[in-house]
Image (spheres, helix red, strand yellow):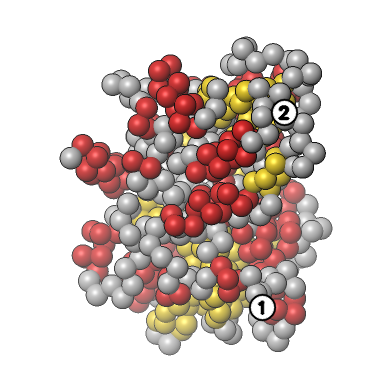
Amino acid sequence: MPEHLDHKCAVTAITSLTGHRNDAASRTGVMLDALKSRGGAAWGISTHTRHEALGTLSSTQQKDLTNSDTFANWGAISAIGHNRYITSGNAHPDMSQPFEFEVDGVRYAFAFNGTITNFEQLKTELGGIRIDVDTEVIRRILINAICEHTRDNMEEVFRTLEQKLDGAFNIVMMDEKGAIYAYRDSLGFHPLVHAKANGNRIVIASEDYGIKQAFPDIADEAIKTLKPGQLIIVRDGQVDIQQIIELPHHAHCFFEWIYFANYLSKLEDVDVEKIRIRLGEILAKNDPEISGDTEIVRIEPVPHSSMAAGEGYAKQKKLPVSEDIERRTEERSFTHIPEERLATAEQKLQIREDADIEGKEIILIDDSMVRGTTMNALVKKLRAQNPAAIHLRLTCPPVVALCFYGIDISVLDELIARKYLNEDGNLAEEGLRLLAEELDVDSVKFLPTIDMLKVFEEFGISREDLCTACISGKYPTPAGQQLYEIALQEEAS
């Protein structure tokens, strides 16, 4: 993947509609902390009075984002924030968001979640790119569009973005006068929600879990999904939601429900936890070889993202869920740069000292497997406990293609399942055997794509509204498909 494609993150925003509140920055900090699983490389906050982007993870560990004293005397009524997840490139502070710019004497700050797939084309068209990153392209387009349409016509500003950008782009923006703007791209790859909190504040976040942590008393029904192609403008004591563009179908990232989102969140008004439980149930129905013998079989979900799937699998098998695997850190190896992934994978999952594994048949439930880094580290620890067998079961179909829309699936030869595909592009019995051998497990099974899609349809999400590019090689945007074709050519040569 090109080096500029480096942002999959959480974006948050808060503003006060009436009166003056001084906790916008601290509430934004709470949301960032709650959503840190979406990106832990760096965080940044901008308010209408100041900007603070703290570069690397080691910097953020010295700050308690949940402590209001961290933001003492900021005195802000509007703030936006950003958690960065590096899918490639590096942790240079210049790439930390929010980014700032000025137009006609008015200062703006913005943050973005996603990836711009036609970056190279836009970089050539715009010329003079200061930082070789897709956020910089968005900044340049915003500057030009505001110059042309003015601050009073933000609808046309964001319509211009839609016309120029190919890819995923959720954006929150703020100006020095305290106005907040939030936009979700018309395909709706990644989630964005908003709510009216405590009577007079508008709050926006990548997931509703972040809003609930910042405003614990908020009712579920108060949190609304921003629809694809919609723009929120919070300005001069008014809230306006405009439909900038409306498409017949969307491209919601299925991986958000499978793995990325917090299990307590709702995406497109559908509970993440319920989807995962149902996926686990179907996985168990497809697995008749595994018995319900409570004396020997242990259902071991990988914490935390697979706990709900493990619950569904165990329920279907009429077995209890064992919790012999514990997570020692909330960091995800998936969100780290390559040289850090193995160390993170080895540290984050451990076997409990009182684990009942020796001589038992372990059914290891996980949500997905991309590179196999975490799984290799975990299986090695389980083998040290002398189980009778380890069977790996995954609720996601094999990841065999790249993602160009904000998930770090960027190099074909890193995809562990891909090298075992047969000539028809399927992971057949022999491929599964070889994959199990590499992972040092006795067997491995994935939930078939058709069964996964049926689960989403049970919850009212049409398969036509899901992006499944990473498991199908079929991309919802022209530039995404073009990048994949280039990757295939490089692989062949």
Q: Nearer the viewer, residue 395 or 142?
A: 395
Q: Which badge, 1 or 2, comes first in the chain's sequence?
A: 1
In the rendered view, tell whether residue 417 sits above or below residue 344.
Answer: above
x, y percentage for residue 277? 68, 31
Question: Which quadrant of the figure has residue 50?
Answer: bottom right
- Residue type, numbered disc 1: Ile
Q: Say which residue appears at 41% left-offset and 62% top-offset.
A: 158
Residue that carries the numbered disc 1 in the rendered image: 77
Numbered-mark total = 2
- Split into 4 quadrants, where in the image is the C terminus? top left
Q: Say which residue appears at 38% left-offset and 62% top-offset.
A: 89
Q: Nearer the viewer, residue 440 or 461?
A: 440
x, y percentage for residue 113? 48, 58
- Contact flag, marks 1 and 2 (Cβ < 8 Å): no
Question: Which quadrant of the figure has residue 120?
Answer: bottom left
Q: Secondary structure at mark 2?
A: loop
Q: Say which residue appears at 30% left-offset and 59% top-offset.
A: 119
For marks 1 and 2, give the one nearer the viewer: 2
Q: Is 191 left, or right, of 115 in this rendering?
A: right
Residue 358's label in the rendered image is 2
- Residue type, numbered disc 2: Glu
> Alpha-carbon distance for marks 1 and 2?
57 Å
Q: Say which residue appears at 66% left-offset and 29% top-offset.
A: 386
- Assess disc 2: are there few (<14), some (14-19) or many (≥20) residues with their C-alpha within 10 Å of its C-alpha: some
x, y percentage for residue 472? 38, 31
- Assess disc 1: are there few (<14), some (14-19) or many (≥20) residues with their C-alpha within 10 Å of its C-alpha: many
Residue 269's label in the rendered image is none
x, y percentage for residue 309? 66, 32
Q: Secondary structure at mark 1?
A: loop
